[in-house]
Image: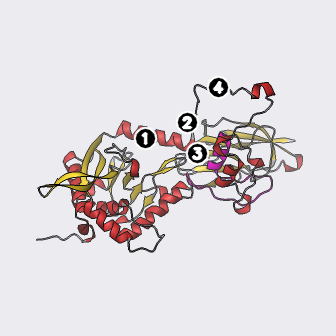
Amino acid sequence: MSEFVFKMPDLGEGTVEAEIVAWHTKPGDAVNEDQVIVEVMTDKAAVEVPAPVSGRVVSVTGVPGDKVAVGSPLIVFELAAHAGTQAGAGAVGVADIAAPADPGPRSGRVMASPANRRRAREAGIDLATVAGSGPGGRIVSADLAAAGGAGRTVVTNVSAETSAVPSAAPETTEIKVIGLRRLIAERMSEAKRTIPHFAYVEEVDITELEALRVHLNGTVPRGAPGLTYLPFVVLALTRALESFPQCNVRYDAAREMLVRHRAVHVGVATQTPDGLKVPVVRNAQSRSVWDLGAEIRRVSERARTNKATRDELMGSTITVTSLGRLGGIASTPVINAPEVAIIGLNKAVERPVVHHGAVVVRRIMNLSSSFDHRFVDGYDAAAMIQALKDLLEHPATIFIPKVNIP
């Protein structure tokens, strides 16, 4: 017998360490080459690390939440005598935060995404006992629900007398902050710590916009997805940015350089089961309102279902965020660094307002925005929101090219 020490591999793009999200094996287990042994996360991506060799696990380094430096021992295998020459580092399958690739069926391996593995752990479900209905026997969310879902509780060795008395719920529950949630926490903290936020809230009369939206939705086939407010706001934003290019910027802190973009790559803040993600609608300025609606739905759904690629989650130049019916009256959205601006949509409601000298019912929606005050002056921030307001209150102007009158 001989031992093989597998070290944390170099996961590329300047990664110096990775956080352990979940171990899929433990000391004493026999594993096969290419069987996933651990899920780790870098600042860029989630990674399923397969075993480089077949053998028995002697020891592992760290628990979920711990960070292991690249090149440090990660796991030790005991090899059979005939396998002693195996010394390759093994391939490491890199996927986006949301989208590990499906490696196909392999002997001795339970196939499930990192998100479903985590749900199973939290629910106390042994994946080895779950029949997968996905491609090649892969376990999907519906399989977990059928097996007991998040509410499943496993109780063993309980006497009849004890089981008849309901146990008191614990006063507290400790939840370790790891993985994507840790990454979100770090980025939010960094944004608030380093960026002086300038907040600006303005109300917008979207009565005419609502009439246009309803009319356009009436032209689509029954059952086809219609337009929400978001594609109109995104299209109007691209028009407003033509006059305020200083808001379509990414700040390169290492070089102390503002990188102004001609194209508008809009990040769409999306709530997912794993936390907030920001998929990107690229070249929004060149898309129609229908194309924008379709692309927003596409990238948001891919983010929610853990299918978004790394490219689909990177490179936005300005972000929009909407809580839909939960939008409230006003909010103070946190800037998606390294951008310098974020626009938030609040709830649209009908209320009485003075319009052309008379009190009438109009549909009103607030826009809540935040700007990096280091690089966007308050006057310019307010002026950009006013330009956006004007476009939304006169929606026909959203579709008319800007004309420079001499």
The colour scheme used here is secondary structure
Quarter of the image for the C terminus: give it.
bottom left
On the image, the x and y values in percent for residue 155 come to: 75, 34
Q: Main secondary structure of the magenta part?
A: loop
Mark 4 to mark 1 CA distance (whole Å): 36 Å
Query: Tag 2 or tag 3, which sits nearer the N-term?
Result: 3
Q: Tell me the tag on residue 41.
A: 3
Query: Tag 4 or tag 2, which sits nearer the N-term?
Result: 4
Magenta segment boundaries in residue numbering: 95-122
For label 3, the crowd category at 10 Å Cα-Cα, with few meaning under 14, some 14 to 19 and many 20 or more, is many
Residue at point 29%, 51% (across, down): 367
> Given the image, on which type of amino acid does mark 4 rest?
Ala
Q: Tell me the tag on residue 188.
A: 1
Indicate whether residue 2 is drawn in magenta: no
On the image, the x and y values in percent for residue 311 come to: 49, 59
On the image, the x and y values in percent for residue 272 come to: 51, 50
Figure quadrant of residue 76: top right
Mark 3 to mark 2 CA distance (whole Å): 13 Å
Which one is in front in this view, the residue at disc 3 or the one at disc 2?
Answer: 2
Give the secondary structure at mark 2.
loop
> Given the image, on which type of amino acid does mark 3 rest?
Met
Which one is in front in this view, the residue at disc 4 or the one at disc 1?
Answer: 4
Quarter of the image for the N terminus: give it.
top right
Query: Tag 1 or tag 3, which sits nearer the N-term?
Result: 3
Which one is in front in this view, the residue at disc 3 or the one at disc 1?
Answer: 1
Can residue 373 be seen? no
Tell me, yes or no, whether the two marked residues, 3 and 2, touch with CB atoms within 8 Å. Answer: no
**Mark 4 = which residue?**
168
Mark 2 to mark 4 CA distance (whole Å): 26 Å
Q: Tell me the tag on residue 211.
A: none
